[in-house]
C-alpha cells in the first residue's frame, strides 16, 4: 500500500509541475500578445511578437532574430515590419534595428549600445535617439 501511495503522490506532483509550467508559458505568450504576418519567399509566416528579440535590416532583406536562436530572413522592409508592431515593447534604435525591449540585458551609455539576452553582439543606438532611449527605458519616464 505504501508503494502505491508513493506512486500516486509522485504522479500528482509531476502533474502539478507540468500544469504550473504550462500556466507560466501561457501567461508569457499572451502578455501583450500580437501576431504579425511576414513574407518569407512565397510563404506567409505568422510570428508571435513575444518571440522576437530584434529585427535587423540588411539591404533588401530583414533578419528577424527570435528566441531559441532562430532567424527568419524575409523580403519585407524594416518599415513594413515596424508598421505591424503595435506593442510599446519595440523600439527603433537605429535606421537598421528594432529591438524588443523585454529582452534588454544591459545598456552601455559610453558606447551607445544595448545588449539583448542571448545575443553576444551589441546593437547600436543612434546618437540622436540616445536621450529618448534613456528617458523611456533607463529612467522610465
Image (spheres, rainbow, N blue to C red):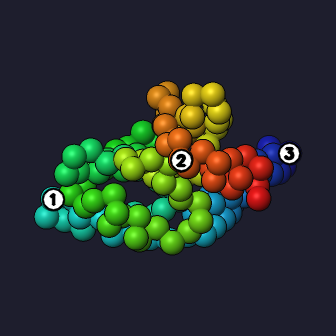
Q: Residue at x 53, y 56 (%)?
A: 91
Q: Return the disc, 1 or 2, that comes first in the chain's sequence.
A: 1
Q: CA distance from mark 1 to mark 3?
A: 60 Å
Front residue of this view, candidates 1 and 46: 46
Residue for point 51% across, 72% down: 86
Whether residues under marks 1 and 3 lie with C-beta atoms below 8 angstroms apart, the answer is no
* Residue 127 higher or lower than 61, as above or below: above
**Residue in the picture at 13% in, 64% down:** 42
Can you tell which quarter of the image residue 38 is in? bottom left
Q: Please indicate, yes or no, whether residue 79 appears anywhere in the rendered image.
A: yes
Could you give the CA–CA distance between mark 2 and mark 3, rounded to whole angstroms? 70 Å
Q: Position of residue 103 (x, y in %)?
A: 59, 46
Q: Which residue is mark 3?
A: 2
Q: Are marks 2 and 3 in contact (CB under 8 Å)?
A: no
Image coordinates of residue 122 in percent, x first then y, are: 50, 31
Q: Is residue 1 left or right of residue 57?
A: right
- Tell me the crowding category of disc 1: few under 14, some 14 to 19, or many 20 or more residues within 10 angstroms, Cα based: few
Residue 83 drawn above or below residue 24: below
The picture places residue 99, in percent across and down from the top left corner, at 50, 50
Q: Is residue 62 left or right of residue 31?
A: left
In front of the other: 53 or 88: 88
Name the residue beneath numbered marker 1: 41
Helix, strand or loop for disc 1: loop
Q: Closer to the observer: label 1 or label 2?
A: 2
* Frontmost residue, 68 versus 65: 65
Where is the C terminus found, in terms of image quarters?
A: bottom right
Q: Quadrant of residue 12?
A: bottom right
Q: Are the two marked residues, 1 and 2, in contact with CB atoms closer than 8 angstroms?
A: no
The residue at which mark 2 appears reads as 128
Question: Which of 9 and 36 lies nearest the eye of the viewer?
Answer: 36
Q: Secondary structure at mark 3?
A: helix
Q: Residue at x 73, y 46 (%)?
A: 138
Amino acid at each position: 500500500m505504501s508503494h502505491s501511495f508513493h506512486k500516486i503522490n509522485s504522479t500528482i506532483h509531476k502533474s502539478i509541475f507540468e500544469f504550473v509550467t504550462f500556466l507560466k508559458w501561457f501567461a508569457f505568450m499572451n502578455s501583450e500578445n500580437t501576431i504579425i504576418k511576414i513574407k518569407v519567399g512565397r510563404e506567409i509566416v505568422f510570428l508571435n511578437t513575444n518571440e522576437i528579440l530584434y529585427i535587423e535590416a540588411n539591404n533588401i532583406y530583414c533578419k528577424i532574430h527570435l528566441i531559441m536562436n532562430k532567424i527568419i530572413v524575409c523580403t519585407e522592409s524594416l518599415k513594413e515590419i515596424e508598421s505591424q508592431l503595435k506593442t510599446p515593447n519595440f523600439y527603433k534604435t537605429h535606421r537598421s534595428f528594432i529591438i524588443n525591449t523585454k529582452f534588454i540585458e544591459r545598456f552601455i551609455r559610453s558606447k551607445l549600445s544595448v545588449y539583448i539576452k542571448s545575443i553576444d553582439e551589441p546593437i547600436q543606438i543612434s546618437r540622436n535617439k540616445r536621450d529618448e532611449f534613456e528617458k523611456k527605458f533607463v529612467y522610465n519616464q
